[in-house]
Image (spheres, rainbow, N blue to C red):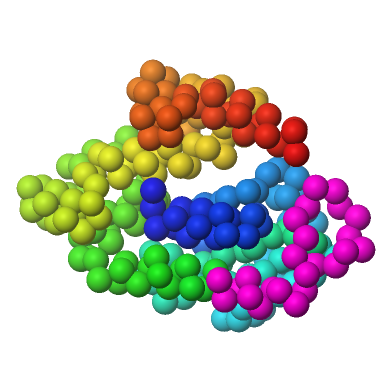
Amino acid sequence: MSKLDEILNDFYCCLSTPIHFVNKKFNVLGEKGMCDDYYDMIKNTTIYKDIKENALSTLNLTYSNNISFLVVPILDYDLYRGYFIVGPFKSDSSCTVPDMVYKPAYLIDNMSQILKHIINEKLSSYNSLSSYTKGCIDYVHRNYSLDIKIDDICEHLNVNKSYFCSVFKKETGYTFTNFLNMMRVERSKRLLMDKNNSILDVALSVGYNNHNYYTTTFKKLNGNTPLEYRNNVLFKSIKN
């Protein structure tokens, strides 16, 4: 699991509030607790325009029907430059949107502080990583859907393969292959939420060239198959 995914998971575990991270071009790089309906809500707001106009500021934004968002910019880390967007959530009990988490307005500052604490805790160690490890993580984030080999990484970074493997394992605790698989599996989870995507389509979209290897890897990392994961999450969504 990447540092970004750890931040998203930890925040969601603390506050059970949907959150996603977008880069400076507003491409989604990670999420927790989001769904298609929430992304549709975002499209019906001016949130990205509002963020552009206040790019350096933590924002508390409220739109029609008292649907709110909290925006925390990240500008200090080479890889993670963008915005954590918390929400949508209800900030006023008069909001009539069903099944949306309610967070009173007076708690929003606390939410911001919790998120910032998690970010600093998770990313403070990132700046101490070598340029080779940072470069590899960045490369994988941008190219995980492609057929990446460790030789490609080493050529891109202009570094000896044996030395790179040693440094990367020492600094991250993972082999390059394990890290790549974790990244791909995490990125595949949102695609699994669309029932129109076959398991093979999902596998191909995140860089696996066959269904069986993807399924085996997914189960090894999560304890269930992609299909079981999809059914479990969709069942919980319907139940709630």
Q: Is residue 161 left or right of residue 97?
A: left
The x and y percentages for residue 222 are: 43, 34
Q: Going 73% across and 58% down the picture, which residue do you hit?
A: 88
> What residue do we see at 66% from left, 57% from top?
17
Horizontal arrangement in the rendering, residue 96 relative to residue 36 (left or right): right
Q: Tell which of 193 and 121 is nearer to you.
A: 121
Q: Position of residue 180 (x, y in %)?
A: 32, 42
- Residue 181, quarter of the rendered image: top left
Q: In this view, does 156 lie to the left or right of 224?
A: left
User: Is 130 colored magenta in this rendering?
Assistant: no
Q: Residue at x 31, y 55 (%)?
A: 137
- Magenta part of the protein: which range? 91-114
With respect to residue 33, does 236 lie above or below?
Answer: above
Residue 75 in the image, given as x and y percentages of width and height: 46, 75
Rendered residue at 60%/29% (across/down): 232
Please say whether residue 107 is visible from this viewpoint: yes
Going by the picture, which residue comes out furthest to the top?
A: 212
Q: From this view, report whether residue 224 is shown above or below residue 167.
A: above
